[in-house]
Amino acid sequence: MAAQPPPSAANRGSMVPFFVVLAVALGLLMVYLLFMLGKAAGGVLRGSAMEAGDRRALPPAVLIPVVPSGEPVELMAYRGDVQVLHFWATWCGPCLKEYPDFADYASSGHVPAGVQIYAISLDDAAEVIPPFLSGVPNSPVVYMDQSGLVDQLQITSIPTTIVVDKAGRIAWRSSGMADWSERGVPRVVEELAGE
């Protein structure tokens, strides 16, 4: 029987695409399994809690109500209350998907006493907000930031939700769609309101 020649380098190279596809498939499977595991566990509250010693002060800011119109709000005047700052815009797809859940929480009657909730639009013009809100009958007052709060808080994506403790310090922050169910942001707010 004649000996077989060793496989050529060209034949070994033909396996590379197979291993690349296998690695990608295993990676996607891993992401899927982690997602399903998180879902089965009741979800994970996305966001970052700040330890009391690491919390930085909310910078002074004035919010201008645009829908409905009204008097400007100075955030520092509400030191002593927990404040929920929800940054969004009508041109942001994830914001539009999340906003009704945020509005439901804000108007639910389950918000503890001593909690202020602000919907802060990052739209360039106030005129674009009412048409969107016509489909969200329970929306809280919508404000626009005239103080550069977005830059001071280094908000680089929306939606972003920031929860401020009674001492006026940032206690929790979420970039991306937040969980407005009872195990999500409301739980954080309730804990801070009880401090």
Image: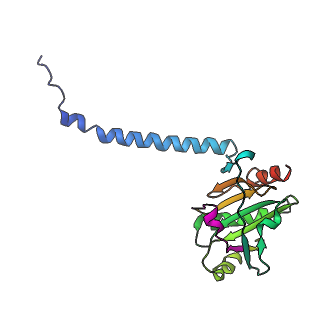
**From the viewer's perspective, is 113 left or right of 96?**
right
Q: Position of residue 177 (x, y in %)?
A: 64, 58
Span colored in magenta: 143-156
Among all residues in the image, which is located at the extreme top?
1
Q: Position of residue 36 (x, y in %)?
A: 60, 44
Identify the residue shown where x is 61% and y is 58%: 176
Up-down: is 182 above or below 71? above
Identify the residue shown where x is 64% and y is 65%: 97
Q: Position of residue 150 (x, y in %)?
A: 63, 66
Along the line of sight, the residue nearer the viewer: 8 or 61: 61
Question: Where, quadrant-wise, is the N terminus in this rendering?
Answer: top left
Identify the residue shown where x is 62% and y is 80%: 125
- Regarding residue 177, the answer to whether it shows in the image is yes
Q: Which colour scheme is used?
A: rainbow
Along the line of sight, the residue nearer the viewer: 70 or 56: 56
Among all residues in the image, which is located at the extreme left?
2
Q: Position of residue 62 (x, y in %)?
A: 73, 72
Along the line of sight, the residue nearer the viewer: 184 or 37: 184
Q: In which quarter of the image is residue 32?
A: top right
- Regarding residue 107, the answer to whether it shows in the image is no
Magenta stretch: includes residue 195: no
Magenta stretch: includes residue 148: yes
Up-down: is 31 above or below 120? above
**From the viewer's perspective, is 86 left or right of 165?**
left
Q: In which quarter of the image is residue 128?
A: bottom right
Up-down: is 113 above or below 72? above
Along the line of sight, the residue nearer the viewer: 26 or 52: 52
